[in-house]
Amino acid sequence: MGDPNQPLDVPAQREANTIEVIFVGAPLDYNTVTTRPATPVNPTVRVQRGNGGDVPGTIVRLPNNTVRWVALDPSVLPVDRYRVTLVADAAAAITSQQHTRLDGEPSNLPSGDDHEGGDFVFTMRVS
């Protein structure tokens, strides 16, 4: 991913239906990484279509502080803009095993401003 403030372009022919995130730093508390529909209220990973509607998915835990969001319907990411939010500024937040919230401000990569909190939000455009 280049500049987190610019949309990430994904060609439609690549069948974009997964988003993989690697968390850098302290060991991730995988139990805090949730999405809809498994967590209908206050999920910590949200993928929304351009019209604001949530895209249902599931979280796959991978080794080395990595998670993969997978769309429940593999054809659910047609050409559109998507907003992806990793939540750190809410009661339900992504945290480390030491209960430190994600440092998510996407001003650079890896993200953060050296203070816990701040949602990581980026736009993905399937075209």
Image (spheres, helix red, strand yellow):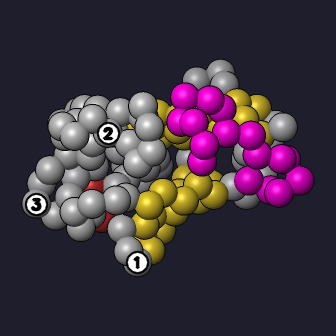
Which residue is tagged 1?
63
Query: Magenta stretch?
Result: 1-16
Estimate the spatial distance between the alpha carbons at disc 2 and disc 3, rounded to whole Å. 18 Å
Q: Earlier in the sequence, mark 1 or mark 3?
A: 1
Quick one: SS at disc 1? Answer: loop
Of the pair 39 and 24, the residue shown nearer to us:
24
For the C terminus, give its image quadrant.
top right
Estimate the spatial distance between the alpha carbons at disc 1 and disc 3, rounded to whole Å. 18 Å
Q: Earlier in the sequence, mark 2 or mark 3?
A: 3
Which residue is tagged 2?
112
Q: Please, what is the three-letter code of the amino acid marked with disc 2?
A: Gly
- Residue 10: in magenta span: yes
Question: Given contact means CB atoms under 8 Å apart, are the residues at marks 1 and 2 in contact?
Answer: no
Q: Please, what is the three-letter code of the amino acid marked with disc 1?
A: Pro
Q: Earlier in the sequence, mark 1 or mark 2?
A: 1
Q: Is residue 49 above or below residue 51?
A: below
Residue situated furthest top in the rendering: 51
How many neighbours does mark 3 have within 10 angstroms: few (below 14), some (14-19), or many (20 or more)?
few
Residue 74, located in which quarter of the rendered image?
bottom right
The location of residue 57, given as percent across then percent down, is 55, 53
Residue situated furthest bottom in the rendering: 63
Quick one: SS at disc 2? Answer: loop
Which residue is located at x 32 percent, y 39 percent?
A: 112
How many neighbours does mark 2 have within 10 angstroms: few (below 14), some (14-19), or many (20 or more)?
some
Which residue is located at x 27 percent, y 42 percent?
A: 103
The location of residue 123, given as percent across then percent down, is 60, 33
Which residue is located at x 40 percent, y 78 percent?
A: 63
